[in-house]
Structure formats: C-alpha cells, structure tokens
Image (cartoon, rainbow, N blue to C red):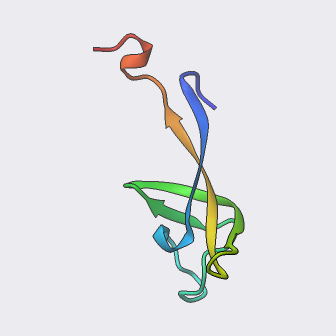
Amino acid sequence: MRPGRAMEQINVRAADCKKVDPTGGGGPVVVGDRVRYADRVWRVVGIYLVYDPATGQSEEYCVLSGVNDRTSSAAGQP
C-alpha cells in the first residue's frame, strides 16, 4: 500500500449495498463481492445478523473494507 493511504472498515445494512459486478445473477451480497456504498466501491469482508428480540426480526449487515486516501487537509494540504 502506498504511503498516505490506510485501510478503512465500515458496517452497513446489506440492503444498502449494491453489487458492482453482479456475475452469476443478482443474488444476495456475499463475502468477496465488490459493492457500491456512499459513492465508493468497497469489498465485502464479512456478513452478520443483528437480531431484535423485541420484534423477533433480524437484519443482515455487511462489513466493508476499502482504502482511504489520507493525503487531504489532515496531512497539511489546504
């Protein structure tokens, strides 16, 4: 990885992720897929369920990993 770049991970609802390369059909998002979220392309590195015992419902979340360019104003740029 180049200097000034860092790995970034976020957790988001699977329903909010859109596959970038839907090869093999339009099935659910799986680990290894590339997805678009918040105008960026991310790699899915994990999936988990959050269960709400009050409603009996569960929701699927994705762990997304990407590279964040840290050469911005935080690095002394205007």
Which residue lies most toward the left here? 78
Q: Residue at x 48, y 26 (%)?
A: 70
Residue situated furthest top in the rendering = 76
Q: Nearer the viewer, residue 74 or 3?
A: 74
Q: How many marks?
A: 0
Q: Residue 60 at x, y = what percent?
A: 63, 72
Q: Quadrant of residue 32?
A: bottom right
Residue at (60, 82) in percent of width and height: 28
Residue 39, x across and y down, in percent: 37, 55
Q: Is residue 19 visible?
A: no
Seen at 60% across and 57% down, the residue is: 43
Image height of 40 relative to 23, above or below: above
Please identify the quadrant where the N terminus is shown.
top right
Q: Could you tell me which quadrant the C terminus lies in?
A: top left
| Residue 8, image x, y percentages | 59, 40
In this picture, residue 24 sits left or right of residue 68: right
Location of residue 7 with respect to 54 vertically, above or below? above
The image position of residue 7, as x and y in percent, is 62, 37
